[in-house]
Image: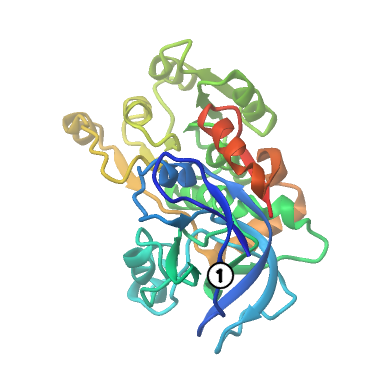
Amino acid sequence: MRAAVLHAYKEPLSIEDVSISQPKAGEVKIKIKATGLCHSDVNVFEGKTPVPPPVVAGHEISGIVEEVGPGVTRVKPGDRVISAFIHPCGKCGNCVAGKENLCETFSQVRLKGVMPDGTSRLSKDGKEIRTFLGGGFAEYAIVGENALTRVPEDMDLEKVAVLGCAGLTGYGAISSARIEPGDTVAVIGVGGVGLSTIQLLRASGAGRIIAVGTKKWKLDRAMELGATDVVNSKETDAVKAIKEITGGGPQVVIEAGGNEETIHMALDSVRIGGKVVLVGLPPATAMIPIRVASIVRGGIEVMGNYGGRPRVDMPKLLELVRQGRYDPSRLVTGRFRLEEINEAVKMLEEGEAIRSLIIP
């Protein structure tokens, strides 16, 4: 099959033929319809998320089940599915406790680019090729069955591909923050995750929703999708503006930018006694200094959130799509063939895309 392979960090991807093995126990082979291109993939390409190359990235996957391994019961050949970026084992302590987004088994292999048994299903000329959270920039992918959710026949598979990360991450952020109807919320970062979060906040009954970003066209999109106010942090003091809009700061700030500036912005703008939810991912080795005294004196609750629960929350997202309360297609700013993926990567790096779909 054809795949977009990264052979060295900060180099273009190479489109080449690779071998894919049969799925093992609990695994599913998917014929890919579309895969969303996310900043987390770019972090791999740049070495900020250091999955060892050669590696095939891509984790917002939709497609058709081609083959199932022994013991698979959740899907069958021919099913239309989306794959989450989280692949829960279903057996570890966190999975059993209902926190499968924090699967302990998956966390041990996530940055190694291998399946839970320590091996990859891709190779070329006898050399193993790793995958990042599914390896969707290819014609086929093999993932664990617990990452998959069946998609209704009347839904466009391309439309729902970005639920696999952008949608599930936004859903998890709102769930962990325990947003209540009428709460004032600021969302810092208006990429795929931020714009998903804004739509889901609107669906959950949040009150004032402030979108913070640096690109006017993305802030305009945020207003279209449910934000009540926007702040361009390149043109104004964002912390001051957020506090003025909210009369002292929002009850909740959801940080989706994933860098030192946006994290400080979130901590400095939240109301006393409020919550800051960190969902943006900086480089794996990033260390960000914070003013601990202000967090302690303000009684600020700071929490990290790594997405939602694929088997529990993804069906709820699909229902919101069905009801028209969440439209993932509004995140898609381009469609590219697999051979055009380097062009799509460049646009994302330059801030000229939200989510591009890579079509094999």
Question: For the residue carrying disc 1, how many other residues have a C-alpha within 10 Å: few (<14), some (14-19), or many (20+)?
Answer: some
Residue at figure coordinates x 43%, y 62% from the top left: 101
Q: Quadrant of the N terminus?
A: bottom right
Q: Is residue 181 visible?
A: yes
270 shown above or below 231: below
66 shown above or below 272: below
- Taking the image as shown, residue 325 lies to the left or right of residue 132, namely right
Residue that lies at the very extreme toward the right in this rendered image: 154
Residue 318 pos. (x, y %): 68, 58
Residue 316 pos. (x, y %): 63, 60
Q: Nearer the viewer, residue 18 or 298?
A: 18
Residue 225 pos. (x, y %): 67, 34
Residue that lies at the very extreme toward the front in this rendered image: 125
Q: Quadrant of the C terminus?
A: bottom right
Residue at figure coordinates x 76%, y 55% from the top left: 322
Amino acid type, callout 1 = Ser
Residue at figure coordinates x 72%, y 44% from the top left: 329
349 shown above or below 8: above
Residue at figure coordinates x 61%, y 73% from the top left: 29
- The secondary element bearing badge 1 is classed as strand
Q: Is residue 327 visible?
A: no
- Taking the image as shown, residue 32 lies to the left or right of residue 108, namely right
Using the rendered view, name the quadrant where residue 43 is placed.
Answer: top left
Residue that lies at the very extreme toward the bottom in this rendered image: 71
Q: Nearer the viewer, residue 336 or 233?
A: 336
- Taking the image as shown, residue 32 lies to the left or right of residue 243, namely right
The number of numbered badges drawn on the structure is 1
308 shown above or below 222: below
Q: Nearer the viewer, residue 249 or 303?
A: 303
Residue that lies at the very extreme toward the top in this rendered image: 235
Pointer 1: what residue? 19
Residue 81 pos. (x, y %): 67, 67
